[in-house]
Image (spheres, rainbow, N blue to C red):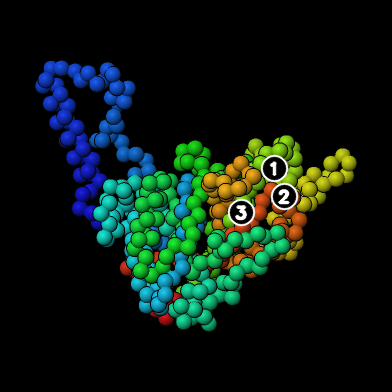
Amino acid sequence: MFPLTRRGFLTGLSVTAGGAALAACSTGESDPAATTNPMAQQESPDPAGDTPRLYDAIVPFDGEHQAGIATPAQANLNLIGFNFVDGVDRGAVSRLMTSWSEDSRRLCTGETPLGSLEPELVVAPANLTVTCGFGPRVFEVIDAVDKRPDWLRPLPEYKLDQLDEKWGQTDLVIQVCSDDPTMLSHATRHLVRSGMDYARVHWMQQGFLRADGAHTPGETPRNLFGQVDGTVNPREEEQFDEQVWIGDDTPEWMQGSTSMVLRRINMNMDTWEMLDRPSREEALGRTLDNGAPLTGENEFDEPDFEATDKFGLPVIDHQSHVFRAKPADGHPEQRILRRPYNYDIAPEPGSEQLSNSGLVFICYQKDPVTQYDPIQQRLDEADRMNEWITHIGSAVYWMPPGTSADGSTGDAYWGQRLLEA
């Protein structure tokens, strides 16, 4: 931890400000800049006053499960895919995970990681979380292919996919989220730098949601089509145990872990915006204003897929997104935890689209093969939204269990029991 505490830092500012004010009064003159410079007339925040809310907004790093999965989605995302440098072995992976875990633990609690000279940049964690995942190749590098989960493999290439390898599978993934973009950037830079002897960045996918304070707690996020995205997510602990967390019927090193599916989805804003609102809602199967199914009034009303209109036609189109995404009859396990982020970057050179926008679609589940894949197969087959979206990136990761600082319960660092087995 850096020696200058937050309280000491703020107190020092207060003393300095008080001395400056006394000096100004002793001259008996006013500062002419105060009447000519609008910025000088603004009130400065009182450093001894209330602490900004996000200064002390801390999500515990340690726990049974990694933070950043069940955690309410923060406003900003940096998702970084790493590939190992040549020569990395089990011992090197263990050292990297130890370093990353220790540094992330400090960053998430507003402490300066060892070797960092920027304590000023970690004073406001702003709900920072750092979450790590292993790609299929990790199990080859550590000589543990026999322990690799059966589902830890590339998803099938669906018929409408237009996958670009630059957004493809990597050896490792780090998900960094925060409500403050400066904290997010600093944490990302530190982790990339501290891991450079072991792994290098293959891609970074940045995303955003509404800023902290621009939505009510628990409000379902919206994508850039205006669609609420995540209405059917698990919310109760029992639902997370059923859908997300890998249980005690697996080896000890897997218990409390989960899987991440990553899909980069381009959204054609130009053609979507040609639709009127009723056409958009028909394609979604939900209203845009509050996300209610077309057969209901509120977002969390159960859709009635049997309801028909006065002409005998289904109120909810059987090719709408909400219909195609629902679990198949007799398969309640086909549910996932969605944690997507919007992206909006510069248009590709030569592109006719006015923008380059879409989703960094992240979801968590026990088993992608039995939970995510059937959903995506149905969507790929007949979802009306396919006219306006294209999947351009895909990857799957195993997300190790949570940690404890001293290793007294579970792992002291990400994947410890696997790596030291």
Query: Residue 271 shows which numbered tag?
Result: 1
Residue 297 lies in quadrant: top right
Note whether residue 150 is visible.
yes
The image position of residue 28, as x and y in percent, is: 13, 17
At numbered mark 2, what does the secondary structure look like: helix, strand or loop? Answer: helix
**Residue 157 vs residue 110, the one in the foreground:** 157
At numbered mark 3, what does the secondary structure look like: helix, strand or loop? Answer: strand
> Furthest residue to the front?
350
The image position of residue 107, as x and y in percent, is: 34, 55
Image check: 10 left or right of 86? left
Q: Earlier in the sequence, mark 3 or mark 1?
A: 3
Q: Earlier in the sequence, mark 3 or mark 2?
A: 3
Asked whether the residues under the numbered discs 1 and 2 touch, taking CB atoms below 8 Å apart as contact, a structural biologist would say yes
Query: Residue 265 shows which numbered tag?
Result: 3
The image position of residue 4, as x and y in percent, is: 21, 49
**On the rendered image, what quadrant is the C terminus found in?**
bottom left
Q: Amino acid at mark 3?
A: Ile
**Up-down: is 45 above or below 211?**
above
Image check: 415 left or right of 394? left
Q: Amino acid at mark 1?
A: Thr
Image check: 82 left or right of 336? left
Q: Label 2, on which residue?
A: 387
**Up-down: is 86 above or below 75?**
below
Task: Give the alpha-carbon distance from disc 3 to disc 1, as whole Å.
Answer: 15 Å
Task: Give the alpha-carbon distance from disc 3 to disc 2, as whole Å.
Answer: 12 Å
Q: Residue at x 17, y 35 (%)?
A: 16
> Furthest residue to the left?
26
